[in-house]
Amino acid sequence: MNNTEYYERLGVSKSASQDEIKKAYRKLSKQYHPDINKEAGAEDKYKEIQEAYETLGDEQKRAAYDQYGAAGAGGFGGFDGFSSGGFGGFDDIFSSFFGGGGAQSNPTAPRQGQDLQYRMKLKFEEAIFGVDKEISYPREQACHTCHGNGAKPGTQPVTCSKCGGRGQVQVARDTPLGRVMTTATCDVCHGTGKEIKEKCPTCHGSGHEKQEHKVKVSVPAGVETGQQMRMQGGGDAGVNQGPYGDLYVVFDVAASDKFERDGSDIFYDMPLEFVQAALGDEVEVPTVHGNVKLKIPAGTQTGQNFRLRGKGAPKLRGTGNGDQHVIVNIVTPKKLNDAQKEALTAFAKASGQSVSAQKPEGFFDKLKKEFK
């Protein structure tokens, strides 16, 4: 993948601002959300949009993506991806010839297990108000039979007879510079420093087994798609009796059929009749907190924005709620009865306007058009 594909998915240029990226994401995620769009391929398109926004919506990840592509962006957030130590530099070349050159970690030391990722789907309201959910996922756990040491019950691992517990052995190797001694991982204990004479019948000496793990997640109020929550110790079991890795719960929030959301602010498009907008009215407006009354002043125009303070989503990194923005959309009636036509004609006359009312096409009018 090149480092422009995510921009293409959102339909923006590489120079797009964060606001432009956010607006494009809001529009496309609502268009292709599988809860709204039932067309074939909509769900796959939605996942691609989510993946692109998770990277481009974060300035650090975006900078890494621009420089290294998708692999670079994955390095932020504790999952897969590149790290500065992953490139084989001079130390690696030196080590291949002379068995060292850089600091060697102790292969028998306890090491933390792998981090895992879990994508949690949330309803729009669940993300607004928070929710407690129990999730289940597979992970590597310490074997319940041998408790992680890999040995058959009643026996214990012993110090490796080949490396003496060091986990490494010296190996003679012929190089262009002559015969040299290099350091290699012990082929008997595989670097653990322990030799298992009788292996555990459950895990066959690995010390781990795959199991379904259940955990309760308290989702805080105000989360958004792409944000993640770290569950310490929720990952895979460690190596050499090391601690468990962590679980990163990534949230995927469903679209609403009424509202759009931008951070803690919520937007609602409200249809309004011409008479209500011209004369003013008091209307009932839905919010995530329940219906509220809103006074519409006389002379309201299409696109006018009314702010309902504190009626938005909770601020995840702050106090209080955001606001709800009510955007007015004046509806033009498609059909009028005679009384309505007379009233509007009188209105136009009183306003000094000359209107040439168009009569609706009848059957014979349409027939004449076809013959012409």
Image (cartoon, rainbow, N blue to C red):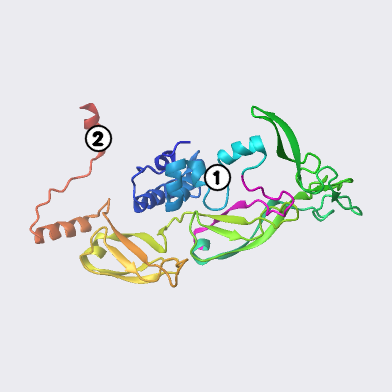
Does dot 1 land on a helix, a strand or a loop? loop
> For mark 1, what is the residue?
81
Q: Is residue 49 at least partly visible in the picture? A: yes
Q: Nearer the viewer, residue 283 or 369?
A: 283
Residue 146, numbered circle: none
The chief SS type of the magenta part is: loop
Amino acid carrying label 2: it is Lys
Q: Position of residue 63 (x, y in %)?
A: 42, 48
* Horizontal and vertical percent position of residue 261: 41, 59
| Residue type, mark 1 in image | Gly
In the image, farthest residue toward the left = 352
Can see residue 38? no
In whole angstroms, how far apart are the C-alphas of marks 2 and 1?
Answer: 64 Å
Q: Which residue is mark 2?
A: 366
Q: Nearer the viewer, residue 252 or 113?
A: 113
Q: Residue at x 64, y 39 (%)?
A: 95
Compared with residue 345, is residue 202 higher up or lower down, i.e. above or below?
above
- Region in magenta: 102-125
- Callout 1 environment at 10 Å: few (<14), some (14 to 19), or many (20+)? some
Query: Is residue 122 found inside the magenta-colored segment of the image?
Result: yes
Q: Position of residue 93 (x, y in %)?
A: 60, 36
